[in-house]
Image: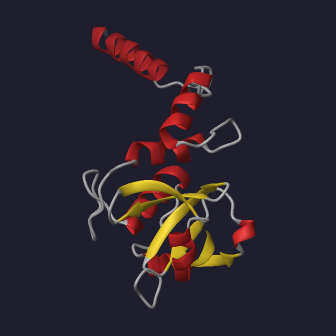
């Protein structure tokens, strides 16, 4: 009889601990503070506000200055397509192809005037096919991996990028 009583108590305790967490409040995602926006704006040299995708800008900020290494995909060295691939996985939850040329083929071409945050910008640099990719931020600015300076932000209006610009694409 003792064993049955003990068993019943164990069952009740087990079932009580397995009840739904419906009544448990979820942790609320907090909006970044003005200070966080200001610090990120200063780091990226862009005006970041509530209308921007803060996750995108934080990602770029965390990678700024990481050196370029062709074929590399680590936090100590990275190439342009891996940077874009990781950004899309972590910021948008999308999986992209590994190379700039494959990303170009896989995206829907858009006009430069239609670029919005997160669109891809493609370049042919000393190549006949697309060899470089970046992610559009806003107001002509895009994040990418320069072979000489690593992860950085540049503007599409700069002569070098105008010369090599091929097209813009939106992930399907």
Q: Count every numbered label the image shows and give the total.
A: 0
The answer to whether 9 appears left or right of 72 in the picture is: right
Question: If the image is split into quadrants, where does the N terminus sit?
Answer: top left
Residue 156 in the image: above or below residue 124: above
In the rendered image, residue 162, in percent from the top left (x then y), is placed at: 58, 73
In the rendered image, residue 43, in percent from the top left (x then y), is placed at: 48, 38
Residue occupying image coordinates x 39% and y 55%: 151
Residue 31 in the image: above or below residue 73: above
Residue 62 in the image: above or below residue 4: below
- The front one of 142 and 56 is 142
Residue 108 in the image: above or below residue 50: below
Residue occupying image coordinates x 52% and y 35%: 42
- The front one of 36 and 27 is 36
Residue occupying image coordinates x 38% and y 64%: 82
In the rendered image, residue 25, in percent from the top left (x then y), is placed at: 60, 20
The answer to whether 159 appears left or right of 11 in the picture is: right
Question: If the image is split into quadrants, where does the C terminus sit?
Answer: bottom right
- The front one of 3 and 98 is 98
Seen as rendered, the residue at the extreme bottom is 128
The answer to whether 131 appears left or right of 139 in the picture is: left
Seen as rendered, the residue at the extreme right is 113
Seen as rendered, the residue at the extreme top is 2
Q: Quadrant of residue 136?
A: bottom right
Q: Quadrant of residue 13?
A: top left
Residue occupying image coordinates x 66% and y 43%: 52
């Amino acid at each position: 009889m003792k064993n049955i009583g003990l068993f019943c108590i164990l069952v009740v305790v087990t079932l009580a601990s397995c009840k739904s967490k419906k009544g448990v409040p979820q942790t609320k995602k907090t909006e970044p503070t003005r200070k966080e926006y200001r610090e990120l704006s200063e780091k990226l040299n862009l005006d970041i506000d509530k209308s921007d995708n803060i996750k995108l800008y934080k990602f770029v900020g965390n990678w700024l200055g990481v050196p370029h290494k062709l074929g590399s995909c680590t936090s100590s060295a990275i190439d342009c397509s891996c940077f874009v691939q990781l950004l899309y996985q972590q910021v948008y939850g999308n999986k992209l192809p590994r190379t700039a040329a494959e990303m170009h083929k896989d995206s829907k071409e858009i006009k430069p005037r239609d670029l919005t945050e997160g669109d891809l910008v493609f370049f042919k640099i000393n190549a006949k096919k697309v060899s470089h990719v970046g992610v559009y931020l806003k107001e002509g600015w895009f994040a990418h991996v320069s072979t000489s300076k690593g992860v950085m932000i540049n503007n599409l209006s700069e002569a070098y990028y105008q010369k090599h610009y091929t097209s813009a694409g939106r992930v399907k």
